[in-house]
Image: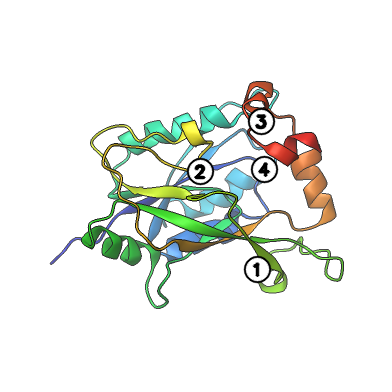
Amino acid sequence: MRRSLRVVALLQVYNGERFITACLEHLISQGVQVHLTDNCSTDRTVELAERYLGRGLIGIDTLPRGGTFSLRPQLEHKERLAEMLDADWFMHVDVDEFRVPVRSGCTLAEAFREVENEGYNAVNFMEFTFIPTRESPDHDHPYFQETMRWYYPFQPFYPHRLNAWKRQPCRVELAWSAGHEVRFPGLRMYPQSFPMRHYLFLSLRHAVEKFVATKYDPQEVASGWFRWRARI
């Protein structure tokens, strides 16, 4: 009997209590296990996540947070985890993203098996960004996926979200592209992008908390990371 494919989502989060339960339940339902790195959250993120330990959540660790939001150390931490953890495939995931396979009726884990069988070792995702509207401005509740229906496709460059990959014998680079694109020798990207729903913010209050109150690493901003978010 063929062994099932083991897919591990590398999830890093800071103050993600709005999303963490829905995120974990979605990934686990897709046949994906999760390793959570908490960036010193001050809300209930870890408390809520701990309920899933042994039920799809394989571990929780902590990455210290300085006075600014610094993405590079987080991504380099994920690179190290991908070398250490036992998995067939890895996926770089944020807590407000929900990824699904192209073909209905199968899970992400099953879809990655099909990708691998066709000789590919990396998958790109097509991002669909969901945001509140003037007519429906507040979705700051656990059922945001049911009420937030307006979205737009977001692909400023291609590939834009090439961040699921088959385990490699060498270190896979993720930080070089701010997490948008993995890099390793012999990369073969699957020709069809998988869909990804991204819930950028759930209300005006949430947007202020998420973006206005955040101080970004000056060196990363100077490198062109964060773009409009750092200019709010």
Q: Is residue 143 left or right of residue 189?
A: right
Kindly identify which residue carries mark 1: 145
> Residue 159: x, y in percent?
47, 50
Residue type at mark 4 is Asn
Nearer to us of marks 2 and 3 is 2
Q: What number is the disc on residue 15? A: 4
N-terminal label among 1 and 4: 4
Whether residue 42 is visible to the viewer of this picture, yes or no, is: no
Q: Is residue 217 left or right of residue 83?
A: right
Q: Which residue bears the numbered disc 2?
A: 180
State the separation of the CA atoms marked 4 and 3: 12 Å
Check disc 3: other Cα within 10 Å, few if <14, some if 14-19, many if 20+.
some
- Residue flagged by tag 2: what amino acid is it? His
Question: Which marked residue is nearer to the observer: mark 4 or mark 3?
Answer: 3
Looking at the image, tell me whether mark 2 or mark 3 is earlier in sequence order. Answer: 3
Q: Position of residue 93 (x, y in %)?
A: 50, 49
Is label 2 or label 1 in front? 2
State the SS at label 2: loop
Mark-to-mark CA distance, 2 and 1: 24 Å
> Residue lying farthest left?
1
Question: What element does badge 4 sit on?
Answer: loop
Q: Earlier in the sequence, mark 4 or mark 3?
A: 4
The foreground one among 185 and 78 is 185
Compare marks 2 and 1 and give the one earlier in the sequence.
1
With respect to residue 191, does 85 lie above or below? above
The residue shown at (43%, 69%) is 102
Separation of disc 4 and disc 2 at Cα? 22 Å
Amino acid, disc 1: Gln
Q: Residue placed farthest to the front in the image?
A: 157
Amino acid bearing label 3: Phe
Quick one: label 4 or label 2, which is nearer the N terminus?
4
Q: Which residue is mark 3?
A: 69
